[in-house]
Image (cartoon, grey):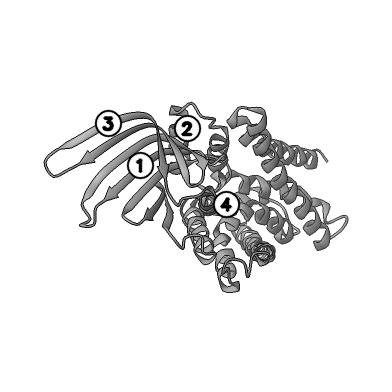
Amino acid sequence: MKTLQRYIGRDVLSATLLIFMALIMLFAFFDLIHELGDVGRNGYTMSAAVLFVTLNIPSRLYELFPVAALIGTLFGLAQLVANSEYTVMRVGIPLAIATFLAGEYVAPPAERLAQTVRSASQGSASRIIARQFKSGFWFKQDLTFVNVRTVLADLKLLGVRIYEFDHDLRLKSVRIAESATYSGDGTWRLSNVKTTEIEAERTEVTSARTLDWETVLRPSLLTVYQVAPERLELNALYDNIRVLGASAQKTSRFEIALWNKVFYPIAVLVMMILALPFAHFQRRQGGVGFRIFVGTILGLAFFLVGRTFSHLGVLNDWPPLFSAVFPLAAFTALAIGMMWYIERR
């Protein structure tokens, strides 16, 4: 029995990895085609486009794990299916762990670097130096350093800190604003501002309800550097929820992304269990082509249903946990139902 389990496990794992590589190459190809539309504009070169697509691969890796697990299991499952549920679980657990690690530690920094490379190659940062970090968005203009904790979907800024230095690189002033909105012509309207002026012999602190801040920073640059909540790590999502909640801002998109991040690795196991009933069906009708077709349809359905419920949850103010978990629960119920049907037969 152990020999059979090893055989099934090895076959399923190798098929899953093969399908996974094929999916990664296919999606990378589509991403490159999408980027070709911007090649030649604002100094955006072909090599920069290829680098941007390459840095986006970890994000695709995280998104495609469940689909690859489903198709790979359908493709690689042996004719003998006795004890295959246990074997698939043993294979699926390491893949689920790998999914979580990729989404938490590989994809987010790669996504930030990809946005930075794309922006720099297009000349967006020709006048300022900007980067996206876990602590938020940072940029430098002359002798001024600015940190923006959160950029909302409407490009409103939350948690703005402005550090100004003199020509001897001594800190001259610190300005902290609760939020900022773009009013046009390179001017941002800061709200609830606290300014600390630092001089040689004294320090002066002043407060203002609003204050205009002139800078070369434009919303277009923030759009380039902004990372979607779905591609942030758990700590960053939690920080965004906390900051937005404290400012009475809507947090549903970040909460849905957080719950998706928590439960998404389980989707690998669910997809592999969902593939098991088709090992019985394929002995009577169809073969490899049938399994690949079914796996592709089910994988795309899971991907689209998950995305749809995430967007509907934001638009309709559904409970974030429901929006994130319902697609997974529905496919889990489908897998259990199909297994029960097979056992009854």
Residue drawn 45% across the image and 43% down it: 236
Judge left or right: residue 317 versus residue 297. left
- The alpha-carbon separation of the residues under discs 2 and 4 comes to 40 Å
Residue drawn 61% across the image and 52% down it: 63
Q: Amino acid at mark 1?
A: Arg
Front position in the image: 211 or 38? 211
Which residue is labeled 3 in the image?
A: 206
Of pointers 3 and 2, the one earlier in the residue sequence: 3
User: Mark 2 or mark 4: which is in front?
Assistant: 2
Of pointers 3 and 1, the one earlier in the residue sequence: 1
* Residue 69 screen position, x and y as percent: 65, 55
Q: Say which mark, if any, is on residue 161.
A: 1
Q: Say which mark, if any, is on residue 90.
A: 4
Q: Amino acid at mark 4?
A: Arg
> Helix or strand or loop: what does disc 4 sit on?
helix
User: Mark 4 or mark 3: which is in front?
Assistant: 3
Which residue is labeled 2 in the image?
A: 244
Q: Say which mark, if any, is on residue 236.
A: none
Do tag 2 and tag 4 residues touch (Cβ < 8 Å)? no
User: Mark 3 or mark 1: which is in front?
Assistant: 3
- The alpha-carbon separation of the residues under discs 4 and 3 comes to 62 Å
